């Protein structure tokens, strides 16, 4: 029997954006894969791009904001049924711009302790736990 085909593995940078003691959560749009779950915004890392460069580009494209990329948190790899994702999270702050939703259905600025009340994408759950653990 031939080996099973390897499933697609994507590498994604994501931003935990802090502002005024609150953290930004973004709700995936209905047309996106995994619709209407919450995530830390970001996107696929392109060839030749660092995770930090990716975040700056993606947040300008998706939300129309410029960010300052700060500390990296532990990467998380998660196996979904049809693909594997490795998320590279960074704690960030907004530098300039007004948030405009180009792909997401909604955003919410929440106190860190309120973030677990949302329905998060499975891969984002461990990132949220790591982030909250580092804040304690």
Image (cartoon, rainbow, N blue to C red):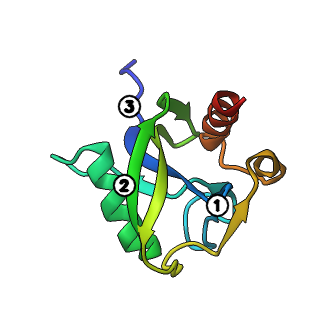
Q: Residues within 10 Å of mark 1 (few under 14, many from 20)?
A: few
Vertical placement of 118 versus 48: above or below? below
Residue ID at (37%, 41%)? 11
Q: Are marks 2 and 3 in contact (CB under 8 Å)?
A: no
Label 3 sits on a secondary structure element that is loop
Q: Nearer the viewer, mark 2 or mark 3?
A: 2
Q: Residues within 10 Å of mark 3 (few under 14, many from 20)?
A: few
Q: Nearer the viewer, mark 3 or mark 1?
A: 1
Residue ID at (51%, 74%)? 103
- Give the x, y percent position of residue 23: 65, 56
Vertical placement of 127 versus 46: above or below? above
Using the numbered discs, state the Cα–Cα distance from disc 3 to disc 1 in whole angstroms.
47 Å
Using the numbered discs, state the Cα–Cα distance from disc 2 to disc 3 in whole angstroms.
30 Å
Q: Which mark is residue 5?
A: 3
Vertical placement of 122 versus 69: above or below? above
Q: Which residue is mark 2?
A: 55
**Residue closest to the eye, 70 or 128:** 70
- Give the x, y percent position of residue 5: 38, 31
Task: Identify the image quadrant of residue 88.
Answer: top left
**Residue closest to the eye, 69 or 108:** 69
Tell which circle, 3 or 1, labels the residue nearer the N-terminal end. Answer: 3
Q: Which residue is mark 1?
A: 20
Q: Residue furthest top?
A: 1
Q: Residue furthest front?
A: 20
Vertical placement of 6 versus 31: above or below? above
- Give the side of residue 6 with respect to residue 106, left or right: left
Q: Residues within 10 Å of mark 2 (few under 14, many from 20)?
A: many
């Amino acid at each position: 029997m031939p080996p099973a085909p390897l499933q697609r593995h994507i590498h994604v940078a994501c931003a935990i954006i802090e502002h005024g003691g609150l953290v930004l959560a973004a709700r995936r749009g209905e047309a996106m894969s995994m619709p209407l779950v919450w995530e830390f915004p970001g996107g696929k890392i392109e060839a030749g791009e660092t995770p930090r460069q990716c975040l700056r580009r993606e947040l300008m494209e998706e939300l129309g904001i410029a960010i300052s990329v700060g500390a990296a948190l532990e990467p998380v790899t998660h196996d979904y049924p049809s693909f594997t994702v490795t998320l590279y999270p960074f704690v960030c702050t907004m530098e300039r711009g007004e948030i405009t939703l180009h792909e997401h259905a909604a955003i919410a600025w929440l106190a860190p302790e309120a973030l677990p009340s949302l329905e998060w994408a499975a891969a984002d759950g461990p990132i949220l736990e790591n982030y909250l653990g580092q804040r304690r």
